[in-house]
Image (cartoon, helix red, strand yellow):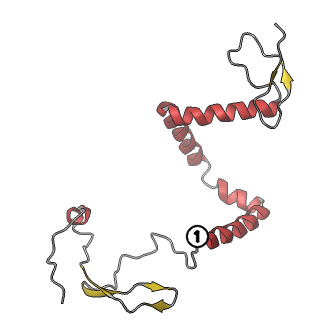
Amino acid sequence: MNQKVRCANSACRRLFSPNPHVKNHRYCSRKECQRVRKSLWQRQKMKDDPDYRDNHRDAQRCWMGHNRDYWQRYREQHPEYVKRNRILQIQRDRRRCIRDLAKMDASDGISFVKPGSYYLIPAKGNLAKMDASPQRYFLIPSTYPDLAKKDTVDFPSSLP
């Protein structure tokens, strides 16, 4: 049985003789084709097998625990990577139309907004519209975690 089949790797597509002992033999023995085959297998395994996914995550965490400074060293040794990443990040930010970026945890927990009545004014760019929407806002301190977790809170709906 010398039937030839085409390699399933779209970059290769060479004819090869499949091993009769290997069920659904679709990839030739070239290193690149075997890498593609393994990559697809791993992707499918991560999707379907929760144990495999958990073991993979645990192995990554263990490795990162032993190599905490990996990315810092990598960036020091590859300045072209840092430069390219900065350029690409600027492009990604432009696509998202983000002008000023801030970290989510940059706040020190002090709120300068006072509880009370406010008018919400829809704005576009630097121009504000005239149709303001009156709203009443209540700040919930972090010392009240049970109240802060509720989806709805009954407050008086009267607006000044």
In the shown orientation, is residue 42 left or right of residue 61?
right
**Front residue of this view, candidates 98 and 59:** 98
Quadrant in the rendering for residue 36: top right
**Front residue of this view, candidates 89 and 141:** 89
Does 101 appear above or below 150? below
Residue located at (49% from left, 91% from top): 127
Is disc 1 placed on a helix, strand or loop? Answer: loop
Quadrant of the rendering where the N terminus is positioned: top right
Residue located at (71% from left, 14% from top): 22
Does 132 appear above or below 149? below
Quadrant in the rendering for residue 133: bottom left
Does 101 appear above or below 19? below
Quadrant in the rendering for residue 59: top right
Counting every numbered tag in the picture gives: 1
Name the residue furthest front: 131
Does 142 appear above or below 51? below
Where is residue 116 shown, x and y percent of the image? 23, 86
**Amino acid type assigned to the residue bearing label 1 in the image:** Arg
How crowded is the residue under tag 1: few (<14 C-alpha within 10 Å), some, or many (20+)?
Answer: few
Where is residue 8 shown, x and y percent of the image? 75, 29
Where is residue 91 shown, x and y percent of the image? 68, 70
Question: Residue under circle 1?
Answer: 96
Residue located at (45% from left, 86% from top): 123
**Front residue of this view, candidates 15 and 98:** 15
